[in-house]
Amino acid sequence: MSELSSLDNAQPLLVAEGLAKNYGRLAACRDVSFALYPGEVLAIVGESGSGKSTLLQLLSAQLAPSAGHVAYRMRDGVLRDLAELGEAERRFLFRTDWGFVHQDPAQGLRMGVSAGANVGERLMAVGWNHYGRIRDIASTWLERVEIDVGRIDDAPKTYSGGMRQRLQIARNLVTEPRLVFMDEPTGGLDVSVQARLLDLMRNLVSELGLAAIVVTHDLAVARLLSHRVMVMKGGRVIETGLTDQVLDDPREPYTQLLVSSILPP
């Protein structure tokens, strides 16, 4: 994806400053600082154990940092420290402004209820209460993620892996969030299914003007989806820049190695 020209004049949507997470003597994440802007897609890349998934959990307030902080710009324009939000406020963010796409769709879906209910539940969580309208919107979103509307009453446990991931995307995007976190969204899928899913995600992110933070070991995913890349090694960000710039002309030897090889999952 190309650089967003509108980013220069925008206020940041999310700001991380000096983020760190320690487990005893193990530093899983060390001194990470950056700003994410509205409509920007940032890819966090690196090998297994580099700290990228820990960073994603810190940014999405699922882990408390050992040092540093994360601030998010609310719809009223105020930048709020996530650590100062109450549990109810954080839950509300996840129902409205945020989405989280897991590598394993079973973590982001209720596998025993229908596909329509999975999408509709998020609408009900923000106050929708008209069954017919909820079902209509759920049907529309199934179509948008290329799922046969005739499967709306089927449970996700009857879906293929690719269909489950597309349903998880619909469930997350139905409330029109401003920021979506994605943790290895194409991991474990066949190559042909990955390509279809990536094309869908790229189109939806662009169409809806979403900001997104994507954790991936797959540089092809980073190239296709992101405007900017951060490369992690040993819990630190060792290189960052525009996606094409970093992947086509990496500065750090470690990044050069990643670009010239296929990363293990």
Image (cartoon, rainbow, N blue to C red):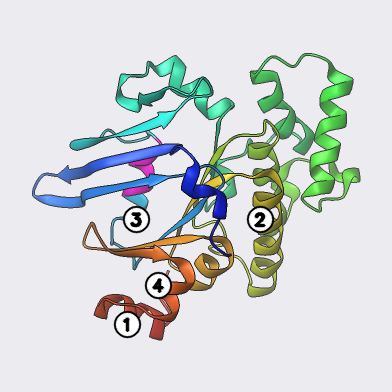
Q: Quadrant of residue 136?
A: top right
Image: magenta residue range: 55-60
Magenta stretch: includes residue 124:
no
Give the residue type at disc 3: Lys
Residue drawn at point x = 91 percent, y = 44 percent: 150
Label 1: few (<14), some (14–19) or many (≥20) C-alpha neighbours in 10 Å: few
User: Could you say which disc has been placed on residue 246 in the image?
Assistant: 4
For marks 2 and 1, give the CA distance: 27 Å
Spatial CA distance of label 4 from label 1 is 12 Å
What's the distance in space between the residues labelled 2 and 3, CA to CA?
20 Å
Task: Pick whichever of labels 2 and 1 is earlier in the sequence.
Answer: 2
Q: Residue at x 28, y 62 (%)?
A: 50
> Image height check: is 50 above or below 29?
below
Q: Which amino acid does label 1 sit on?
A: Leu
Measured in 3D between alpha carbons, the distance from the residue under mark 4 to the one under mark 2, in whole angstroms, is 22 Å
Q: Name the residue under label 1.
A: 257
Which amino acid is tagged 2? Answer: Met
Of residues 91 and 240, the one drawn nearer to the viewer in this rendering: 240
Residue 52, labelled with which disc? 3
Query: Is most of the magenta stretch helix, strand or loop?
Result: helix
Tell which tag, 4 or 1, sits nearer the viewer. 4
Separation of residues labelled 4 and 3 (CA atoms): 17 Å
Q: Where is the N terminus found, in terms of image quarters?
A: bottom right
